[in-house]
Structure formats: C-alpha cells, structure tokens
Image (cartoon, helix red, strand yellow):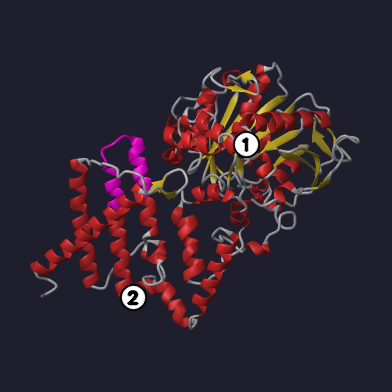
Amino acid sequence: MSASSPEFWTQMSEGFQQNLTKSWGQAMQHFQTMDLGGLQAKPEAAAPALKFSPEKLQALQGQYFKDASELWNQSLHNSLQVKDRRFSGDAWASNPVAAFNAATYLLNARTLMGLADAVDADDKTRNRVRFAIEQWVAAAAPSNFLAFNAEAQKKAVETKGESIAKGVQNLMHDMQQGHVSMTDESLFEVGKNVATTEGAVVFENAFFQLIEYKPLTAKVYEKPFLLIPPCINKFYILDLQPENSLIRYAVSQGHRTFVVSWRNPDESMQDKTWDDYIEQAAIKAISTVQEITGAPKINALGFCVGGTILSTALAVLDARGEKPVASATFLTTLINFTDTGILDVFIDENFVKFREMQMGQGGLLKGQDLASTFSFLRPNDLVWNYVVGNYLKGETPPPFDLLYWNSDSTNLPGPFYAWYLRNTYLENNLVKPRKVTVCGESIDLGQVDMPVYIYGSREDHIVPIGGAYASTQVLPGKKRFVMGASGHIAGVINPPAAKKRSHWLSEGSKFPADVNDWIAAAKEQPGSWWTDWSDWLKSHAGKQIASPKTYGKGSKFKAIEAAPGRYVKAKA
C-alpha cells in the first residue's frame, strides 16, 4: 500500500484515534484510583461519570486530525519538529522512530489535556480531572522508560552498560533514603555550607528554638525583627548561602534579627494542636524577643504557613488587648483562602473528614508524604526529570542548595494539620469575624490594625498571586503590596546583588478587590523587591542604638548553642 494512498491515510488516522482512545481510558482509570489527598491508590473509588462540551469536542477532533496529518507528513519527509526539552537531545533527533514516538505522545498529551478542559462540570471537578490527567500524561512520557528513551539507550551503548549499572545503584540508594535524589545531598551539611549566618540559640521549648544573629553593623534599630518561617519546611530556606540569605540581608541592614527554628515533630508531639503552635511558639517567640531586647514593640515577618501562623497569633493578641508588633511582613502567605490554586483539588469535606478520623486526635503526617504531594504539583520538573537522570542515565544530580533544602522534609502533628485543613482550605474560617476560637479567644483579623507589607509571587503555584493579594482585603492597616516575578521560592529568594527578575509596585492606598485590577495599574521595577522592603521596614524600626555585645540577656536567655542549632538538623 502506498504511503500516499487514501487507504493508508485512513488506517493511520484510525491508529491515531485508537491510540488516543486507549490513552484516555488509561488516564480515566488513573483518575478513578487516585487519592487526591495523598497520591495513593484507592481501588474502591467509583469511576467518574463525565460529560463533554459538544462544541469543544468537535474543535478538538478537528485539531487532532489536522495535527496528526501534519505529524505524519513531517515523518515522511524526515522533518519532525519535537519541541519539548524531554526530547531535545541529539539522540532523539537522529532516531526517526524515537522522534515519531515522542511527537505522537505530545500530540496525544495535548489532546488529552484538551479533553480534560472540555469536561462539562463545575470548576473543581474539571480541575481535578485535569490534575489527574496531567499526572498520568507526565508518567506516561516515553522518556521515562529505557525501552523508549533514545538518549538513555545511546548513553548505555557509549558507556558499555556502565550508565545502567550506575542507575541501579542510584535507585537502590534512593530506595534506602526514602525519596528521589534531586541533588547530591552528600555535598551539603546544615551549619557547614548552608544555614551559616553567625548566631546562637537563646531560647528553646518543645516547639521551637529561637536564634539570635550576630549584628553586622555598629548600630541596630531599636525595634528587633522576628522571622517566622513555615513549619512545613526548615527555616534555612531564608539562609541558604551568604549571598542569597534573607536573614543575613536583614542583619546587614541593621536589624537585631531573631528567627524561629521549628522542631521537627516526633511521636512525642503527635497530639499538638494549632492552638499549641500559636500560643507556645508564635506568641512565645514574640514575648521572648521583647523580654530579651527590652523593646515594647517588635517587627515581625511570616513566610507561607508561617505568615498564617503569625496573622493568627496577632489576632489572638489583639483579642487580649495586646499589640506587641509594630509592623508585619507577609511573604507568599494565605490568610484569605478563597484562591488556593492547584492545592484546591485535594480538599473537600470527605478528604478532610478522613484526615480528621485518621489523625485529628493524634498522629503524625510524615514529612515525606507532604514532600511527595508538593513534588507532584510539578511532576515533570520535580519527579520524572530526576527519575530519568538518576536511574535511566545513571547521572548524579548537580549540587543545588535549594533542592537540598527541598528534600529535607519535616513532619506535622496530626491535630495541627487536621485543624488547619478544615479551618483554612475547606471553610476559610480565619477571615470570618469571631468564627473561630484560638487559644481561648474569639478572633477577628479585621481588627489587626498595623502597617503591613504583603508580597506575592506572580507564578506561584502554591500561594497564587490572587491568594497572596487577598490579604489586602482583610487586614485594615496601612498596606504595601508588591508582586515579584517567578515562583513560591525563587521569587522570594532574590537578592539585590543578583540583579535578576523584576517586581511590580502600585503607589497609593487603593487596593481593588480584583488582583488583576491592581496589576493593571502597577509598574514594573527591575531587580529584587528586597530593597523596597528594606526601606519600608526601616521606616517602622525606630531609631538606631548601639549593637548588643552578647547574645540573649543575662542568665535567663544565655546562648544555648551556636546557630543553626540542633532542632533544624533533626531528620523526619
């Protein structure tokens, strides 16, 4: 049969269609068996009954056959253009079969995602279908399998099988450590080449260690500065290397700086609650900094969940008639949980009830489970990329401090986690005046009246820019909102010296309800947002006084051990 005959093309079209139908069926089976809260199989789940928009289906079908025709014509003329970094190596381009296989996969993947978008359902159901299809599509890429990965095959031949042997060694190593290696973890040690800013632990309890950092200036501002990082990660994301450390930057700007270093929970903390973390950690840290420095007011910063904890603590203190914080900074923080982005696919009443039954009265959410969930939010970049490199090609991933931190997971107490799920992601209770009682106080964030600096990252997939901006509609004090480029971490950790990325500012005191209206009025500024924040913080830090000569204060708050302390070194 001639390749140009109508019969040949009809068979090819039928083949493409059968391939796509099979892929959709496998993807739907994947959707059926996914636990969207823990990425674990649920064989008992019922298959979803999905309907599609007829108009979108018709458009998809037309586009599919157009693209399939173009793909086939390119293959006949040996001119396939596969534009995807997973298939960008010379080995793919020089192997017509591998290139055609990759191109067919990409065509099916685009169409499957289009089918997910064509589901006639509410937004949440459609997003869940899309998320599940995305997971299946990422896992099914031919680059993930040695039998189809032309680049891995070429390397195996060139190394006479050594790359395969090394890949098996890497696989055994990762199975023993319990997670896929994203970097060469043997090259990093906390306190040696990450988390190296000089300081000392001056207080500790069952929840956290309080680190005070050595001043880098002859004078410091009279209002000390406390950072509260997320308890779902370790604090040294704010102190990776001297050149990109937000902590060191704050110290260098003349702030007497303190940081909460969370304890990595073990079985002894399995019954700890959200109230415990507010009272015994956030509020305790604030009062301890006051007592050590003698300052009636301090400035505080909360990052991600640390910001949610800080805002709750401020609301509790306000309900008690206490106002120890002069200004607050919130970095990529959700206070109003209306816009939670992709994480919303995990949350519904059944899932939250399951978690409450599982660990609401006690237990631990394992750090590796949490880390895996976040990794699968970006499966190609944070999962399959390393599977291919580590196991199929036998490569050792390059050293990268941020990915070392990303792999250094932390546990969470079950009752804390269950309360957080229901009252934030599911019911958004924190922004409802007097709806929740925390630490014995009926709280109202609308009464937390102080100057605030709110930062959101434009491409953040964990705290969407609309979610970060939503805090401007809740907090009543004088506000400054800044949008930075990039994502949840890279947008935050952006030192001025690097001269990378941009940030956006809109001068004035108006904050429209829709973040897009704010963005439309904002002006792009080159470089890091750190300098703008530093100028803002200095304006709320008071006069300058002589820097302290010693850590802590007297015998009650003496140096316990050198920073970064032992809490941060505990593994999950």
Q: Tell which of 336 and 275 is nearer to you.
A: 275
- In the image, which disc is placed on residue 355? none
Q: Tell which of 206 and 320 is nearer to you.
A: 206
> Which residue shows up at 52% across the image and 28% down it?
423
Residue 513: where, in percent of width, then height?
45, 25
Range shown magenta: 111-133
Q: Are marks 1 and 2 in contact (CB under 8 Å)?
A: no
Sequence-first disc among 1 and 2: 2
For numbered disc 1, what is the local secondary structure?
helix
Task: Reply yes or no: does residue 125 show up in magenta.
Answer: yes
Q: Amino acid at mark 1?
A: Gly
Q: CA distance from mark 1 to mark 2?
A: 50 Å
For disc 2, the marked residue is 95
Q: Is residue 541 visible?
A: no
Name the outermost residue toward the bottom.
160
Name the outermost residue toward the left.
6
Q: Is residue 307 visible?
A: yes
Q: Considering only vertical position in the picture, is 328 above or below 16?
A: above
- In the image, which disc is placed on residue 306? 1
Q: Amino acid at mark 2?
A: Asn
